[in-house]
Image (tube, rainbow, N blue to C red):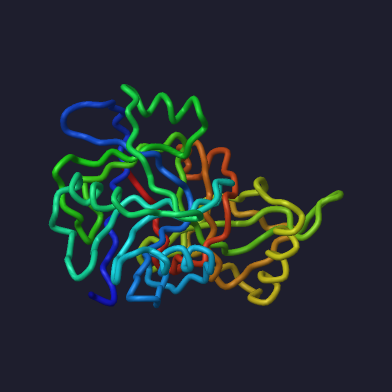
């Protein structure tokens, strides 16, 4: 069994289409991509960038599966839904499965007796899965092409349709809190474009008190004198602190404005699985 297989990534699309002969649909979960490698009782969990993840409950459930070796692919959601949502299997008992059709891989996964906190991602049988995603407040849906292999790259065999846009950003600074707020006022966030760190806006919602205080502690430890943003329009200057761009956050937003800023951004969480230099602006 290989030590590492590059995970397949979905291509963002603005198309909205429903059930048909070409596509299968799954719910899109918003969290940390997790690949699980099982060799006997040894289980290792990695993010999509091959960063080790410590999830004892998940690892224990995988270790108890009645197979000797396997590679699973899925998502650990941070939207309040517990568990590891498994949607693909890449290897099973000495047999590579990535060249097999999607439907066969799903059948092999279906045969595994997953127990909590492992959860199998079911297919959606709705005529319009996109409409259901909007009605039920999901992050979006994934359309997967029937008969397709598992490709170790971003592929158009998997398309992601988001109800609201979401991507990673790097924190380059923050503002002081005002009034009764504690910790910080807003995060100043951006993305990399070549050698530039581009300012994308500020985000002040989506925090609780514990996160505000924890982020302030972490940001104080990496504070610097000068702004790390090399392309910045509308950057605040009052009550502002600059930091080394090491912390990556996941942010949801409605759209990009005409001035290339985020409209109505909201913090989803802090990411430990994404390298800051890999954060770029995602485009459909």
User: Foreground: 209 or 257?
Assistant: 209
* Residue drawn at point x = 14 percent, y = 43 percent: 147
Q: Which of 114 and 223 is in front in this view?
A: 114
Up the image or down, 71 lies above or below 115; here it is below
Residue 190 lies, in percent from the top left, at 50, 57
Q: Dividing the picture into quarters, in which one does residue 98 lie?
A: bottom left
Asked if 241 appears above or below 126 in the picture, the reply is below
- Residue 97 appears left or right of 59: left
For the view shown, which residue lies furthest in the front direction? 66
Q: Is residue 80 left or right of residue 84?
A: right
Residue 20 versus residue 92 in the image, above or below: above
Q: Which residue is painted at 44% across and 34% down in the image?
A: 163
Name the residue at 51% across, 29% down. Answer: 136
Q: Where is residue 232 in the image (x, y as percent from the top left)?
A: 52, 56
Taking 128 as reference, is 233 left or right? right
Number of callouts in the render? 0
Quarter of image, res 177: bottom right
Farthest residue to the top: give it: 127
Q: Looking at the image, which is closer to me, 88 or 188?
A: 88
Relative vertical location of residue 37 with respect to residue 192 in this rendering, above or below: below
- On-image quarter of the C terminus: top left
Compared across the picture, whether 149 is left or right of 244 comes to: left
Task: Give residue 93's position: percent from left, percent from top.
Answer: 23, 68
* x 43%, y 51%: residue: 85
In the image, residue 145 lies at what x, y percent? 19, 40
Quarter containing the N terminus = bottom left
């Amino acid at each position: 069994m290989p030590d590492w297989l590059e995970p397949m990534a979905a291509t963002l699309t603005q198309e909205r289409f429903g059930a048909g002969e070409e596509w299968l649909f799954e719910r899109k979960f918003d969290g940390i991509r997790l690949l699980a490698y099982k060799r006997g009782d040894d289980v290792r969990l990695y993010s999509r960038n091959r960063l080790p993840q410590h999830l004892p409950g998940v690892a224990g459930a995988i270790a108890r599966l009645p197979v000797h070796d396997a590679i699973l692919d899925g998502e650990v959601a941070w939207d309040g839904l517990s568990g590891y949502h498994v949607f693909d299997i890449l290897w099973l008992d000495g047999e590579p499965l990535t060249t097999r059709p999607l439907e066969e891989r799903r059948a092999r996964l279906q045969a595994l007796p997953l127990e909590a906190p492992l959860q199998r991602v079911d297919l959606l049988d709705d005529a319009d899965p996109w409409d259901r995603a909007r009605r039920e407040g999901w992050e979006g849906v994934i359309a997967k092409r029937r008969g397709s292999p598992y490709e170790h790259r971003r592929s158009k065999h998997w398309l992601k349709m988001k109800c609201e846009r979401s991507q990673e950003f790097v924190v380059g600074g923050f503002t002081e809190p005002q009034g009764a707020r504690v910790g910080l006022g807003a995060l100043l966030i951006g993305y990399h474009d070549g050698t530039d760190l581009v300012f994308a806006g500020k985000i002040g919602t989506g925090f609780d008190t514990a996160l505000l205080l924890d982020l302030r502690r972490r940001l104080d430890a990496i504070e610097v004198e000068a702004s790390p943003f090399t392309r910045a329009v509308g950057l605040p200057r009052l009550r502002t602190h600059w930091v080394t761009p090491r912390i990556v956050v996941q942010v949801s937003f409605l759209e990009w404005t005409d001035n290339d800023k985020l409209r109505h951004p909201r913090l989803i969480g802090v990411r430990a699985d994404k390298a800051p230099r890999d954060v770029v602006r995602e485009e459909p």
